Image (tube, rainbow, N blue to C red):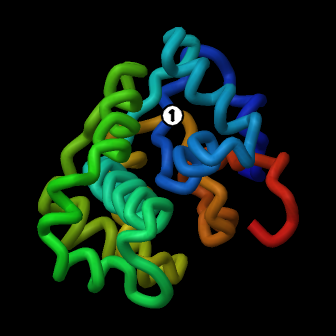
Protein backbone atom coordinates (compact mmCIF):
# COMPACT_ATOMS: atom_id res chain seq x y z
CA UNK A 1 0.00 0.00 0.00
CA UNK A 2 2.90 2.34 0.51
CA UNK A 3 3.51 4.78 3.30
CA UNK A 4 1.76 8.14 3.62
CA UNK A 5 2.54 10.96 6.00
CA UNK A 6 0.28 11.75 8.93
CA UNK A 7 -1.14 14.87 7.25
CA UNK A 8 -2.40 12.78 4.33
CA UNK A 9 -4.73 10.60 6.39
CA UNK A 10 -8.20 11.20 4.92
CA UNK A 11 -10.82 12.84 7.13
CA UNK A 12 -13.21 10.36 8.72
CA UNK A 13 -10.59 7.61 8.91
CA UNK A 14 -10.41 5.23 11.83
CA UNK A 15 -6.80 5.61 12.87
CA UNK A 16 -4.99 3.30 15.30
CA UNK A 17 -2.13 5.29 16.83
CA UNK A 18 1.14 3.80 18.04
CA UNK A 19 3.06 4.96 21.11
CA UNK A 20 5.85 6.72 19.24
CA UNK A 21 3.45 9.08 17.45
CA UNK A 22 2.02 10.15 20.81
CA UNK A 23 5.47 10.69 22.28
CA UNK A 24 6.66 12.67 19.24
CA UNK A 25 3.61 14.92 19.62
CA UNK A 26 4.17 15.33 23.36
CA UNK A 27 7.89 16.06 22.90
CA UNK A 28 7.10 18.52 20.08
CA UNK A 29 9.49 16.78 17.67
CA UNK A 30 6.80 16.21 15.04
CA UNK A 31 4.34 18.89 14.04
CA UNK A 32 2.56 16.23 11.97
CA UNK A 33 2.00 14.14 15.11
CA UNK A 34 0.66 17.19 16.93
CA UNK A 35 -1.71 17.97 14.05
CA UNK A 36 -2.86 14.33 14.03
CA UNK A 37 -3.91 14.59 17.68
CA UNK A 38 -5.67 17.90 17.02
CA UNK A 39 -7.55 16.26 14.14
CA UNK A 40 -8.61 13.46 16.48
CA UNK A 41 -9.75 15.98 19.09
CA UNK A 42 -11.86 17.80 16.49
CA UNK A 43 -13.22 14.44 15.27
CA UNK A 44 -11.83 14.89 11.76
CA UNK A 45 -10.25 11.50 12.48
CA UNK A 46 -11.34 8.74 14.83
CA UNK A 47 -8.25 8.03 16.89
CA UNK A 48 -7.99 4.93 19.01
CA UNK A 49 -5.21 3.33 21.03
CA UNK A 50 -4.87 -0.36 21.74
CA UNK A 51 -4.54 -1.21 25.41
CA UNK A 52 -0.84 -1.97 24.90
CA UNK A 53 -0.26 1.57 23.62
CA UNK A 54 -2.05 3.15 26.60
CA UNK A 55 0.11 1.07 28.92
CA UNK A 56 3.36 1.78 27.08
CA UNK A 57 2.79 5.53 26.78
CA UNK A 58 1.84 5.76 30.47
CA UNK A 59 4.97 3.86 31.46
CA UNK A 60 7.26 5.95 29.22
CA UNK A 61 5.77 9.23 30.42
CA UNK A 62 6.21 8.13 34.05
CA UNK A 63 9.85 7.25 33.44
CA UNK A 64 10.44 10.54 31.59
CA UNK A 65 9.02 12.49 34.53
CA UNK A 66 11.20 10.62 37.03
CA UNK A 67 14.27 11.22 34.84
CA UNK A 68 13.42 14.90 34.39
CA UNK A 69 13.10 15.34 38.16
CA UNK A 70 16.38 13.53 38.77
CA UNK A 71 14.69 10.76 40.78
CA UNK A 72 16.34 8.12 38.57
CA UNK A 73 19.22 8.29 36.12
CA UNK A 74 21.41 6.29 33.81
CA UNK A 75 20.70 2.72 32.88
CA UNK A 76 17.58 0.80 33.91
CA UNK A 77 15.42 3.71 35.10
CA UNK A 78 12.38 1.41 35.37
CA UNK A 79 14.25 -0.94 37.70
CA UNK A 80 15.44 2.01 39.79
CA UNK A 81 11.94 3.44 39.98
CA UNK A 82 10.45 0.07 40.98
CA UNK A 83 12.61 0.23 44.10
CA UNK A 84 11.32 3.70 45.00
CA UNK A 85 7.57 3.46 45.63
CA UNK A 86 7.64 6.82 47.42
CA UNK A 87 8.87 8.45 44.21
CA UNK A 88 6.19 6.69 42.13
CA UNK A 89 3.54 7.97 44.54
CA UNK A 90 4.88 11.52 44.19
CA UNK A 91 4.81 11.64 40.40
CA UNK A 92 1.83 13.36 38.85
CA UNK A 93 2.72 15.15 35.63
CA UNK A 94 2.61 11.93 33.61
CA UNK A 95 -0.89 11.22 34.95
CA UNK A 96 -2.01 14.65 33.79
CA UNK A 97 -0.56 13.97 30.33
CA UNK A 98 -2.38 10.64 30.09
CA UNK A 99 -5.60 12.31 31.23
CA UNK A 100 -5.09 14.96 28.54
CA UNK A 101 -4.90 12.19 25.93
CA UNK A 102 -8.12 10.71 27.29
CA UNK A 103 -9.71 14.16 27.21
CA UNK A 104 -8.86 14.42 23.50
CA UNK A 105 -11.39 11.66 22.95
CA UNK A 106 -8.94 8.98 21.90
CA UNK A 107 -10.49 5.53 22.09
CA UNK A 108 -9.33 2.65 24.27
CA UNK A 109 -9.38 -0.75 22.62
CA UNK A 110 -8.74 -3.76 24.86
CA UNK A 111 -6.45 -6.49 23.65
CA UNK A 112 -8.26 -9.78 23.24
CA UNK A 113 -6.84 -13.23 23.81
CA UNK A 114 -6.86 -13.86 20.04
CA UNK A 115 -5.09 -10.53 19.40
CA UNK A 116 -2.23 -11.65 21.59
CA UNK A 117 -2.02 -15.41 21.28
CA UNK A 118 -3.17 -15.93 17.73
CA UNK A 119 -2.96 -12.93 15.41
CA UNK A 120 0.03 -11.20 17.00
CA UNK A 121 2.08 -14.38 16.83
CA UNK A 122 1.14 -14.76 13.18
CA UNK A 123 2.31 -11.20 12.42
CA UNK A 124 5.50 -11.79 14.36
CA UNK A 125 6.26 -14.84 12.26
CA UNK A 126 5.35 -13.12 9.00
CA UNK A 127 6.85 -9.65 9.52
CA UNK A 128 9.31 -10.12 12.40
CA UNK A 129 7.46 -7.59 14.56
CA UNK A 130 8.15 -7.22 18.26
CA UNK A 131 5.36 -8.20 20.64
CA UNK A 132 3.75 -4.80 21.24
CA UNK A 133 3.95 -3.91 17.54
CA UNK A 134 2.35 -7.20 16.53
CA UNK A 135 -0.48 -6.65 19.03
CA UNK A 136 -1.02 -3.10 17.74
CA UNK A 137 -1.28 -4.50 14.21
CA UNK A 138 -3.63 -7.29 15.33
CA UNK A 139 -5.94 -4.80 17.05
CA UNK A 140 -5.88 -2.42 14.07
CA UNK A 141 -6.84 -5.22 11.70
CA UNK A 142 -9.52 -6.59 14.02
CA UNK A 143 -11.06 -3.11 14.15
CA UNK A 144 -10.76 -2.83 10.36
CA UNK A 145 -8.99 0.49 10.90
CA UNK A 146 -8.28 2.57 7.82
CA UNK A 147 -4.80 3.61 8.96
CA UNK A 148 -2.09 2.61 11.40
CA UNK A 149 -0.09 5.68 12.48
CA UNK A 150 3.42 4.77 13.58
CA UNK A 151 7.02 5.85 13.11
CA UNK A 152 8.24 2.26 13.48
CA UNK A 153 10.06 1.20 10.34
CA UNK A 154 9.01 -2.39 11.02
CA UNK A 155 5.50 -1.53 9.82
CA UNK A 156 6.72 -0.43 6.38
CA UNK A 157 6.44 -3.95 4.99
CA UNK A 158 2.89 -4.51 6.28
CA UNK A 159 0.46 -4.90 3.40
CA UNK A 160 -2.87 -5.46 5.20
CA UNK A 161 -3.40 -1.82 6.25
CA UNK A 162 -2.41 1.68 5.17
CA UNK A 163 0.49 2.88 7.32
CA UNK A 164 1.06 6.58 8.00
CA UNK A 165 4.19 7.93 9.59
CA UNK A 166 5.53 11.33 10.54
CA UNK A 167 7.87 12.48 7.79
CA UNK A 168 9.01 15.60 9.63
CA UNK A 169 11.26 13.89 12.19
CA UNK A 170 14.86 14.95 12.41
CA UNK A 171 17.32 12.25 11.32
CA UNK A 172 18.35 9.98 14.18
CA UNK A 173 14.99 9.99 15.99
Question: Which residue is drawn at the image coordinates 54% and 77% (left, top)?
Answer: 127
Q: Where does residue 33 sit, x and y in percent of width and height?
A: 66, 38
Q: Is residue 163 visible?
A: yes
Mark 1 Cα shell of 10 Å, populated few (<14), some (14-19), many (≥20): many
| For residue 16, side relative to residue 119 (left or right) | right
| Location of residue 165 with respect to 170 vertically, above or below | above
Q: Is residue 149 visible?
A: no
| For residue 103, side relative to residue 21 (left or right) | left
Q: Secondary structure at mark 1?
A: strand
- Residue that mark 1 sits on: 15
Question: Which residue is drawn at the image coordinates 74% and 43% (left, top)?
Answer: 30
Quadrant showing the C terminus: bottom right
Closer to the camera, 146 or 75? Answer: 75
Q: Quadrant of residue 37?
A: top right
Question: Which residue is drawn at the image coordinates 40% and 31% (left, top)?
Answer: 101
Q: Quadrant of residue 119?
A: bottom left
Amino acid sequence: MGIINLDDIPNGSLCVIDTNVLLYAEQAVSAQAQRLLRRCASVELIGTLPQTVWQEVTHKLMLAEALMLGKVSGLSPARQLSRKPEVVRSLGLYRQKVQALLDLGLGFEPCTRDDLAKEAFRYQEHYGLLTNDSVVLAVALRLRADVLASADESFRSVSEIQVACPTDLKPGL
